[in-house]
Image: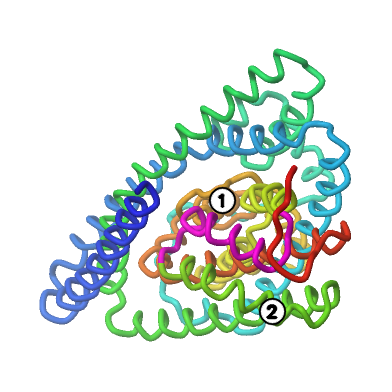
């Protein structure tokens, strides 16, 4: 019943976003063509609607990252199975994250999706450009005060503190268990709060697309179409790479695994929600032969640390915004951006539009304006569908690979007892 209710809510929100997108297109084009005198007012309304949404999103970033990351790491404990399986799978997650970010980065530089976008630059764009020194970057990783880092929404420093805090929990005994329980409850509250904020997503979608089209006219639709095609093409490239790497580990059975994962991937694509797919994904992996103790450990961990589609979008989207604003990022700075995104993408499990949240937090650290998010907010639902499907596929592959590494991958359904 709860799953059906969640699916119904997700479906209604999907419809609301689609309606808002359509209304935004109609209103924006109408103002641009028939009421040019109101273009300025439309842009002001767009700034208000999208700005309010972005502020609400930034408001939940710090506690959300802290709570989800601490609770995720704290659950690992110090069991032998956790150390062995967890160590291997985290290395897999890191490798896949690096591959995903690199593919997104290379595709954005080759395809140049931001070329031709006419985005009004912020008035203080000059102050956004700054020299990024490696020494300063390393020193910046460690926060002098976690409260200061949270007040500034410095995602990297929050991640570092949260990782150290989570690792320390098992050694704290009863106090550690209390803090783990507290962080789990906080994570639950913040997820619900994020869900409340996302209710405003259709309004923000309407405002962003309406303002963009009122300013730029029909040409913007051509840019959006090209961007979607290029992003989906990049996602498909990642699918091919992930499938090939998985084939190298489990062999020809990857074809059988793909058949089991088709339904979860389609469900994830349709709902744009990884959480709604979890029970089905677990069932399909057990049908494939992955023991429940492996799948039940790897999947929750993967929902926090293995968001292949989401992090591909981060590098692809960041370069897109840089190109749209005419900001040149040297390869050295892009490489550092990949490292930052490797960390900032971890720990946010089941958060609606998690990529949007983390991208907003990362952009200012590399001299890129947060306002650039408004350029893709109007089509983010369609991007999120592809990201979610990719996340589901990547986590299904990770669970099967972990079972293979442990030598417990069977030829069919398992009845595993922990």
Q: Position of residue 254 (x, y in %)?
A: 74, 78
Residue 256 is labelled as 2
Q: Which of these two is toward me, 172 or 31?
A: 172
Q: Which of these two is toward me, 327 or 174?
A: 174
Q: Label 2, secondary structure: give it.
A: helix
Q: Main secondary structure of the magenta part?
A: helix
Q: Position of residue 344 (x, y in %)?
A: 65, 48
Q: Which residues are magenta?
A: 271-291
Q: How is the image coloured?
A: rainbow
Report whether 298 appears left or right of 17.
Answer: right
Q: Which of these two is toward me, 322 or 411?
A: 411
Q: Which residue is mark 1?
A: 358
Disc 1 crowd rating (10 Å Cα; few below 14, some 14-19, many 20+) is many
The residues tagged by marks 2 and 1 sit, at their Cα atoms, a distance apart of: 34 Å
Above or below, 44 against 260 in this view is above
Q: Which of these two is toward me, 31 or 171?
A: 171
Report whether 352 appears left or right of 326.
Answer: left
Do the residues under discs 2 and 1 have CB atoms within 8 angstroms? no
* Residue at the image position 40 percent from the left and 63 percent from the top: 377
Q: Position of residue 323 (x, y in %)?
A: 56, 73
Marks 2 and 1: which is nearer the front?
Answer: 2
Residue 413 figure quarter: bottom right
Q: Position of residue 1 (x, y in %)?
A: 34, 48
Quadrant that contains the C terminus: top right
* The stretch drawn in magenta includes residue 218: no
* Residue at the image position 18 percent from the left and 76 percent from the top: 26
Dot 2 or dot 1: first in sequence order is 2
Report whether 48 appears left or right of 278.
Answer: left
Residue 248 figure quarter: bottom right
Q: Is residue 208 visible?
A: yes
């Amino acid at each position: 019943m709860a799953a059906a209710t969640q699916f119904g809510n997700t479906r209604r929100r999907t419809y609301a976003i689609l309606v808002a997108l359509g209304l935004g297109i109609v209103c924006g084009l109408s103002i641009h063509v028939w009421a040019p005198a109101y273009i300025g007012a439309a842009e002001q309304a767009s700034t208000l609607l999208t700005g309010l949404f972005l502020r609400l999103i930034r408001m939940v970033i710090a506690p959300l990252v802290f709570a989800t990351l601490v609770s995720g790491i704290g659950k690992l404990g110090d069991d032998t199975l956790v150390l062995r399986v967890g160590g291997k799978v985290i290395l897999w997650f890191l490798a896949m994250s690096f591959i995903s970010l690199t593919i997104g980065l290379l595709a954005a530089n080759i395809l140049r999706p931001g070329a031709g976008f006419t985005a009004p630059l912020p008035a203080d764009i000059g102050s956004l450009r700054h020299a990024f020194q490696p020494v300063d970057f390393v020193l910046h990783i460690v926060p002098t005060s976690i409260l200061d880092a949270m007040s500034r929404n410095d995602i990297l420093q929050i991640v570092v503190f949260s990782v150290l805090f989570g690792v320390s929990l098992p050694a704290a005994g009863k106090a550690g268990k209390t803090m783990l329980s507290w962080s789990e409850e906080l994570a639950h509250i913040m997820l619900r709060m994020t869900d409340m904020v996302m209710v405003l997503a259709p309004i923000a979608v309407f405002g962003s697309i309406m303002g963009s089209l009122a300013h730029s006219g029909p040409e913007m639709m051509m840019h959006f179409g090209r961007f979607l095609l290029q992003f989906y093409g990049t996602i498909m490239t990642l699918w091919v790479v992930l499938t090939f790497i998985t084939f190298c580990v489990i062999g020809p059975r990857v074809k059988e695994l793909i058949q089991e994962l088709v339904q979860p991937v389609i469900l994830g694509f349709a709902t744009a929600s990884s959480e709604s797919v979890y029970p089905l994904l677990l069932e399909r992996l057990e049908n494939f032969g992955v023991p429940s103790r492996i799948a039940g450990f790897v999947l929750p961990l993967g929902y926090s640390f293995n968001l292949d589609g989401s992090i591909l979008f981060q590098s692809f989207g960041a370069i897109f915004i840089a190109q749209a604003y005419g900001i040149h990022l040297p390869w050295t700075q892009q490489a550092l951006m990949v490292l930052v995104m490797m960390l900032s993408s971890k720990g946010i499990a089941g958060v609606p539009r998690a990529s949007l949240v983390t991208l907003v937090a990362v952009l200012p650290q590399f001299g890129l304006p947060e306002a650039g998010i408004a350029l893709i907010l109007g089509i983010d639902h369609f991007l999120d569908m592809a990201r979610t499907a990719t996340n589901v596929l990547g986590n299904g592959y990770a669970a099967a690979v972990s079972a293979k590494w442990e030598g417990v991958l069977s030829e069919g359904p398992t009845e595993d007892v922990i």
